[in-house]
Amino acid sequence: MDIVSIRGAITADNNTIKDITDATVELCKEILDKNNIKTDDIVNIIFSMTKDLNAVYPAKALREKFDVKDIPLFCTQEADIQDSLSMCIRVLITVKSSLNKSEVKHIYLKEAKKLRPDLLK
């Protein structure tokens, strides 16, 4: 098995614990499902959020909904770039996998699809 990283992003509907939690879980579940990854294969997860999201850490939300207690999780604030997408949660998941880089499915949901139109099919 090799180590690969998978990227993704999603927008939250509102700056609430529920909306951030729901978006985080939806994004991570989709990434794991589409790439056939089990939680035991996860090395670590790094989240970033835009400054308009501050009701809850995505890592806390994920810990409450997934079995990831032994996985290092890290959150940071996304750089505040003029005219960038708002209400956005981004993730980088590093996993042990037999996938090679060209087989990895990076996942962008809701308004975050605008970030990587090249990945849309």
Image (tube, rainbow, N blue to C red):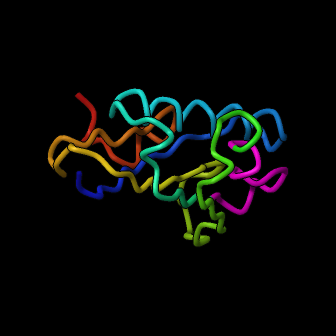
On screen, residue 80 versus residue 16, left or right, reads: left
Magenta segment: 49-62
- Could you tell me which residue is drawn at 51 percent across and 53 percent down? 91
| Viewer-proximal residue among 28 and 85 | 28
Q: Is residue 66 magenta?
A: no
Q: Is residue 53 magenta?
A: yes
On screen, residue 30 versus residue 16, left or right, reads: left
Q: Position of residue 17 (x, y in %)?
A: 84, 40
- Could you tell me which residue is drawn at 50 percent across and 40 percent down? 39
Quadrant where the C terminus is found in the figure? top left
Q: In the image, is residue 80 above or below residue 7?
A: below
- Could you tell me which residue is drawn at 39 percent across and 36 percent down? 37
Determine which quarter of the picture holds residue 52. bottom right
| Viewer-proximal residue among 9 and 103 | 103
Q: Position of residue 65 (x, y in %)?
A: 71, 33
Determine which quarter of the picture holds residue 33. top left
On screen, residue 9 versus residue 100, left or right, reads: right
Q: Position of residue 50 (x, y in %)?
A: 65, 59
On screen, residue 104 versus residue 110, left or right, reads: left
Q: Position of residue 21 (x, y in %)?
A: 73, 37
